[in-house]
């Protein structure tokens, strides 16, 4: 269904109809539409991490070059997973609403585990960042994914506006480029700050 419509338009009634169950029967397994979507988000992000873990780092090139390569890998792989991006972009405003505290706790524990896996993955590609720098890079990449996905999916009215004028069309954000550039610049910035901090420490 999410291949046909955005998260915001997916209703529990239509979901029940598609699976051939009455709505009360669906609610026996999931407490709400949002709980269904949170479960799907966890599945999607775990599949994405598994895909990334199959890509072994080469270890070649400078830290900045490896950061640029990782940024391209992350951006490209995310662009190929529109359902994951749509779910991530709706996480705070939609998916985490209308759920119980228990469901929220389960979700956050799963999210924490996924974040830890992504941090370890970044450390494999750019060990110079360390755990703290890798966590900051993962956080920035995911936040940019959430924002860039929304901005790169304009309404019909905005599509018409872009089509009317090449100058306006140039303002339409490109999802892959935004995520790639933001991740690469963040990685190089974190590396530069670490070098500055290391050089500022007096030798004993």
Image (cartoon, grey):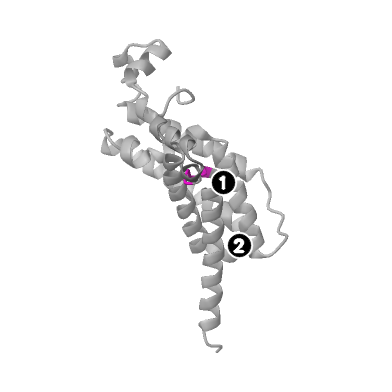
Query: SS at mark 2?
Result: helix
Q: 162 or 192: which is nearer to us? A: 162
Decide: is 6 above or below 112.
above
Task: Give how far across and how far down residue 16 sits, in percent.
Answer: 36, 15
Calculate the distance from the C-alpha at mark 2 to the C-alpha at mark 1.
20 Å
Residue indicated by mark 1: 75
Residue at the image position 55 percent from the left and 71 percent from the top? 192
- Residue 113 appears left or right of 9: right
Task: Give how far across and how far down residue 92 sits, in percent.
Answer: 34, 42
Residue indicated by mark 2: 127
Q: 87 or 158: which is nearer to us? A: 158
Residue at the image position 45 percent from the left and 26 percent from the top? 2
Decide: is 31 above or below 182.
above
Q: 65 or 149: which is nearer to us? A: 149
Q: Which residues are magenta?
A: 171-175
Residue 54 located within the stretch drawn in magenta: no
Res. 114 mark: none
Task: Give how far across and how far down residue 171 sits, in percent.
Answer: 47, 46
Residue at the image position 45 percent from the left and 36 percent from the top? 153
Residue 174 located within the stretch drawn in magenta: yes
Q: Quadrant of the C terminus?
A: bottom right
Decide: is 200 above or below 92.
below
Number of other residues with Cα within 10 Å of mark 1, as a class: few under 14, some 14 to 19, many 20 or more: many
Which quadrant would residue 63 be assigned to in this image? bottom right
Number of other residues with Cα within 10 Å of mark 2, as a class: few under 14, some 14 to 19, many 20 or more: some
Query: SS at mark 1?
Result: helix
- Residue 39 appears left or right of 130: left
**Magenta: predominant secondary structure element?**
loop
């Amino acid at each position: 269904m999410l291949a046909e419509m955005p998260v915001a338009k997916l209703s529990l009634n239509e979901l029940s109809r598609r699976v051939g169950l009455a709505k009360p029967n669906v609610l026996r397994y999931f407490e709400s539409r949002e709980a269904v979507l949170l479960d799907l988000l966890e599945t999607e992000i775990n599949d994405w991490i598994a895909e990334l873990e199959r890509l072994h780092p080469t270890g070649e090139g400078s830290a900045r070059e490896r950061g640029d390569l990782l940024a391209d890998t992350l951006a490209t792989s995310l662009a190929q997973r529109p359902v994951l991006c749509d779910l991530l972009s709706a996480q705070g405003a939609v998916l985490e609403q209308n759920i119980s505290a228990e469901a929220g706790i389960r979700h956050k524990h799963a999210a924490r585990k996924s974040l830890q896996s992504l941090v370890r993955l970044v450390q494999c590609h750019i060990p110079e960042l360390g755990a703290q720098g890798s966590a900051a890079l993962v956080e920035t990449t995911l936040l940019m994914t959430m924002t860039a996905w929304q901005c790169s999916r304009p309404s019909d009215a905005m599509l018409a506006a872009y089509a009317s004028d090449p100058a306006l069309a140039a303002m339409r954000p490109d999802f892959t480029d935004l995520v790639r550039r933001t991740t690469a610049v963040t990685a190089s910035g974190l590396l530069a700050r670490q070098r500055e901090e290391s050089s500022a420490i007096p030798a004993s």
